[in-house]
């Protein structure tokens, strides 16, 4: 039951995202925008990333059907991270569109958003590295130390995401005012 509710919520978020991506789906960027640990495709079009999110959601459905608990948790987290990354990418497009024009204040908030996105990406990469090292630790003390590092990194990710949310809300308010 919880799984079906989760899938419904994720479907809803993906559909909302699809509406935001639709006008931009075929637009080409100068370079791939996302870390290859988050998205396997390294496309120049946002529509391709939306397709990968849908594929991840489909894999999640199969994991629910097959009752693969560990895979289910991993895929659920992955699809949420993918959705968030694509949402933030769409939010920063105006910065890239300005190409030096526009107000300095607007450029600053978009730069702040881009910086925080990079912080989050690097923190997630550090977490993935520590998680892979955790199983390789030989003593309980080493494992506990690695677990403490993971907890600290996860707390930093949460603070970073909270800051990202505030920045995104500020951007949304500014867009509404225009």
Image (cartoon, rainbow, N blue to C red):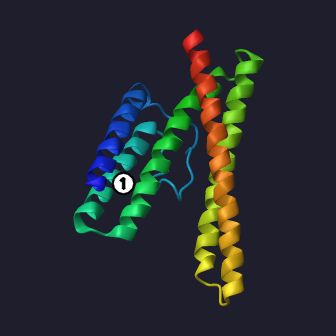
Q: Residue at x 72, y 24 (%)?
A: 107
Q: Which residue is drawn at 70% across and 15% down?
A: 102
Q: In this view, does 15 lie to the left or right of 39?
A: left
Looking at the figure, which quarter contains the C terminus?
A: top right
Q: Residue at x 55, y 36 (%)?
A: 89
Q: Is residue 79 left or right of residue 93?
A: left
Q: Which residue is drawn at 50% across and 49% down?
A: 81
Disc 1 crowd, CA 10 A, few/some/many (<14, 14-19, 20+) = some
Q: Is residue 155 above or below residue 44?
A: below
Q: Mark 1 points at which residue?
A: 56
Image coordinates for residue 130, horizontal then vertical, percent: 64, 71
As helix, strand or loop, the secondary structure at mark 1 comes to helix
Looking at the figure, which quarter contains the N terminus?
A: bottom left
Q: Is residue 64 left or right of residue 147?
A: left
Image coordinates for residue 134, horizontal then vertical, percent: 62, 78
Image coordinates for residue 31, horizontal then vertical, percent: 58, 42
Q: Quadrant of residue 25?
A: top left
């Amino acid at each position: 039951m919880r799984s079906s509710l989760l899938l419904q919520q994720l479907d809803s978020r993906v559909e909302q995202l699809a509406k935001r991506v639709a006008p931009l789906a075929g637009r080409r960027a100068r370079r791939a925008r996302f870390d290859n640990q988050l998205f396997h495709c390294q496309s120049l079009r946002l529509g391709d990333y939306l397709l990968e999110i849908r594929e991840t959601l489909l894999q999640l459905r199969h994991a629910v059907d097959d009752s693969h608990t560990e895979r289910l948790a991993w895929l659920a987290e992955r699809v949420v991270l993918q959705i968030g990354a694509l949402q933030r990418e769409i939010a920063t497009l105006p910065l890239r569109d300005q190409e030096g024009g526009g107000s300095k204040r607007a450029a600053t908030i978009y730069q702040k958003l881009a910086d925080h996105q990079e912080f989050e990406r690097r923190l997630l990469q550090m977490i993935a590295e520590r998680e892979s090292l955790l199983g390789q630790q030989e003593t309980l003390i080493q494992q506990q130390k690695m677990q403490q590092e993971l907890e600290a990194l996860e707390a930093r990710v949460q603070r970073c995401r909270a800051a990202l949310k505030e920045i995104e809300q500020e951007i949304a308010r500014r867009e509404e005012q225009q």
